[in-house]
Image (tube, rainbow, N blue to C red):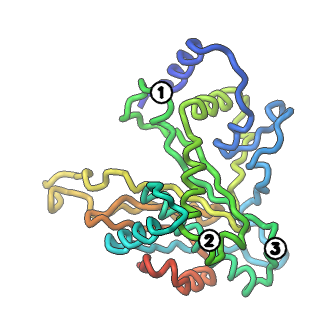
Amino acid sequence: MNHSLPRTLWEERRRDQPAREVDPATWDYLGFEPTGELSKGVSGLKVQSFKPVPAGFPGPGKQPRDLNSSMFSVSPESLEQLRKDVAADPEMKGINLTDSDILHALYWRAMIRARHRAAKECHGEIIGPEDESTLELVVDARPYFNPLLPSSYMGNMLVVTRSSLPVDELCSPKTSIGRISLLIREAASGVNPSVVNDAFGLLEGVPDYTDLRYAFMRLDGLDAMITNMMLFPANDVAFGGEFFEAGGQAEAVRIVHDGFNTGFRMCVILPYRKDGGIEFLFGTFPEELERLKEDEEFMKYAKYMG
């Protein structure tokens, strides 16, 4: 619980290394666009392509809408079939992907497909060949920060990675889940100790954190964000047998999601269930959920839970 420990470890590491310039592109791993003095000479960042829109500010005469949380599950059998289908993709060329890579790709494509259709069919929006979709993945930075940071450290240390594709290409049936997975794996491989420590150093130089605004905070557009809890050891959580059955072992993990639905397109992949299946939790508008359920590729593997 010592939240000053990362700063101490970072300062010790910096003293042991020769001085060098921090790559300004590291701001992209933070999700914040630099402001004021920090922004001088910094351009070409991916976060600069995002235009933050305050939640609850609809057009004239329109009422603000929040997303509604929905949950889908992927059974162990469907997950195994998904693995086999991706492994059979000629583009894989023997490359081993994680379940996370594949599930991120499955969700990203299906969700943007549904939102793309809803935007055109319900709201008359025109999506051109130049329009891109960006997937943000939240990465736990603690394992990359410093070997002396204990695994039991309770503070959050997060960085984000971004993958982008033209919307038409992402939604096309000619683009395989395997190909999308490879793109996501390539972005994830960019996270390393140098990036994480540089990101920490950039934030150490921010005089006023209230000046920073997270670029991804919006409900419009065709972007997606995922935070992945698959490897959280939920099956090891137990509250004892004095008041609970089965020793108080947790049967499932649920999070309070409604707060994200007012201004964030956030998908949470919940921890592996005891049977090896997984669950998605995310927000949609009703017209998007309707079209998601019509996506044959997604529903081949996923089941709507409510």
Type of the residue with mark 3: Gly
Point out the tag, 3 or 1, that comes first from the N-terminus: 3
SS class of the residue under badge 2?
Answer: loop
Alpha-carbon span between mark 2 and mark 3: 18 Å
Q: Are marks 2 and 1 in contact (CB under 8 Å)?
A: no
Q: Is residue 103 left or right of residue 29?
A: left
Point out the tag, 2 or 1, that comes first from the N-terminus: 1
Residue 306: in sight, yes or no?
Answer: no
**Residue shown at 56% from the left, 81% from the top:** 292
SS class of the residue under badge 1?
Answer: loop
**Residue shown at 79% from the left, 75% from the top:** 127
Please provide percent x and percent y for residue 194.
Answer: 58, 30
Type of the residue with mark 2: Thr
SS class of the residue under badge 3?
Answer: loop
Q: Which residue is mark 3?
A: 128
**Residue shown at 50% from the left, 68% from the top:** 89
Point out the tag, 2 or 3, that comes first from the N-terminus: 3
Instruction: Looking at the picture, tell me which residue is in the foreground, 253 or 188.
Output: 188
Picture quarter containing residue 264?
A: bottom right
Q: Which residue is mark 1?
A: 146
Q: Is residue 170 left or right of residue 280?
A: right
Q: Which residue is mark 2?
A: 175
**Residue shown at 60% from the left, 82% from the top:** 286
Query: Around disc 3, counting alpha carbons within 10 Å, would you say few (fewer than 14), some (14 to 19), or many (20 or more)?
Result: few
Please provide percent x and percent y for residue 246.
Answer: 15, 60
- Reply above or below: 176 against 201: below
Picture quarter containing residue 83?
A: bottom left
Query: Around disc 1, counting alpha carbons within 10 Å, would you say few (fewer than 14), some (14 to 19), or many (20 or more)?
Result: some
Query: Around disc 2, counting alpha carbons within 10 Å, would you say few (fewer than 14), some (14 to 19), or many (20 or more)?
Result: few
